Amino acid sequence: MDMDFYYDLITKAASYVKILLTVINLAFLLRPYVRKRGDAYAGAVIYGLVMIILYAIPLEMKFWMAYFVGAALSYLYLMAMDKRNGRQKIFLFLSFFILEYLTHSIVIEEMNLIADKTGLMEFSARSMEAAIATLLLSEAGWLVQRFLFLHVSLRIFHRVYKRKRENLSARELVCMAIPQVMVIFFKPVEYMYYDLYMQCMEEGLIKKYIPANGYICLFSITAYLAVLVMLALFQRLRDGQEELRQMQLADSQMAEMKAHIRQMEALYEDIRAMRHDMGNHIQVMEHLIEENHGTEAASYLRRLKREWGQAVSEVKTGNPVTDVIIREKMREAGRRQISFQCDFHFPEKTNVDAFDVGVILGNALNNCLESVNGVHPWIKISSSRRNQLFLITVKNSYAGDMEWDRERGVPLSMKKGEGHGIGLANIRRVARSYLGDMLFEQGEDSVTLQVMLQIEDDDDCFTT
């Protein structure tokens, strides 16, 4: 058997191993971005099977077309399993194959440089056995280095790309794809250059390695860094936007709190005014009764009772701020024919700030009013305290399967557009400021939010 037989056998085996290793890395990339890990594995396997079939069947197809067919079928499968974040999945596939190409180019140029400096090519020309050994060594080294380099690159990608559950807008996708598109346009030029070089080698015009290899490697390294730097800049921009939204929400919540306080002050002013006038009301009632004006006395009493009921809050939590917030949400629930039960009690004589609790209650009850459903919808709010732990529980009826953000452990917001999900982020921010956290649970017909705070009694609080 001649050298061509061994060359074909070794290179074909290396190609199949390359496809297998690519499937492993693709599954590793997709895993955090889909709801079920099995979908990531299946999507990667679909790509691998397509590539094996296209490689095994001698079709007249460009290499980039084979990549496109495999990626497209894998993408369609993932979208069928999880229809969310379609543009993000496009960006993931595009980034994967660009990183794969760049790491491949860098490793190839590095191995060519090693072969040139160590005289490996001269050694392979001594005998067929030396040529086979050199080919096996180079193919194994290429496969191992390529796999490890790409795997490390994907780990860096995961670390930099933090917002794994957020979709990209069309504008963001275009901006993020600019470095990838630059590489796509360069690749045909590189292949044409290599074809020209091989033709010159066959005709005996040149005998050495391509003089521009170093420049191709430098381009690949620069493009590789550009892809990761662009991703890091995008994440930093999104973090800044998130901080700005939270600041805006905090400002709006502060304005809402001030409005609650004004309502509370007006409420208690009305109560004080009625108490002040109570003596006059009693005198009027005594006068009507003494003169036997029973009908007028009854009418006057009904009016007095109605005004008193309007002035006195039907919610008694132990704090005027939480009284006003819960009362407003209770009235809104009543207008929408939603049953509302309240067993919340503010922890008195502790370091808990009423404004912080107001942020938790306001956002939690807003989420309940947004998501509550069922034939007989209901909302329940309660609190309990055990030693230094204060637990707020907000529960509402919910029929159906709720989509979850597994990374943060919260349900995905039903709101669309900018600002969605910020309310839950603010609840968690307040809870963690008290060394606590929040927890969501979905039952058969309900969703429960529990917020735990670590509190201290006033006697335990010290000032410096």
Image (cartoon, grey):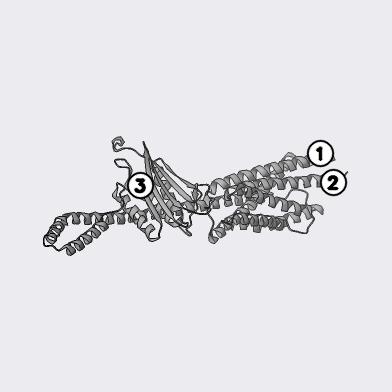
In this rendering, position of residue 17 left or right of residue 314: right
In the rendered image, residue 159, in percent from the top left (x then y), is placed at 55, 45
Q: Secondary structure at mark 1?
A: helix
Q: Position of residue 212 (x, y in %)?
A: 69, 51
What is the C-alpha distance between the residues marked 2 and 3? Answer: 81 Å
Which is closer to the viewer, label 2 or label 1? 2
Q: Which residue does the image show at 75% across and 45% down from the upper left?
A: 14
**Do callouts 2 and 3 mark residues in contact (Cβ within 8 Å)?**
no
Neighbour tally class for label 2: few under 14, some 14-19, many 20 plus, Cα within 10 Å:
few
Q: CA distance from mark 2 to mark 1?
A: 15 Å
**Label 2 is placed on what type of residue?**
Phe
Residue of label 3: 344
What amino acid is at disc 3? Phe
Q: What's the distance in space between the residues labelled 3 and 1, CA to CA?
A: 82 Å
- The residue that disc 1 covers is 130
Q: Residues within 10 Å of mark 1 (few under 14, many from 20)?
A: some
Give x and y (percent) for residue 185: 65, 59
Q: Which mark is residue 5?
A: 2
Q: Is residue 455 visible?
A: yes
Element type at marker 3? loop
Indicate the position of residue 2 as horizontal and vertical percent values: 87, 44
Tell me the residue at 35%/50% (across/down): 358
- In the image shown, does 360 or 147 lie closer to the viewer? 360
Q: Amino acid at mark 1?
A: Ala
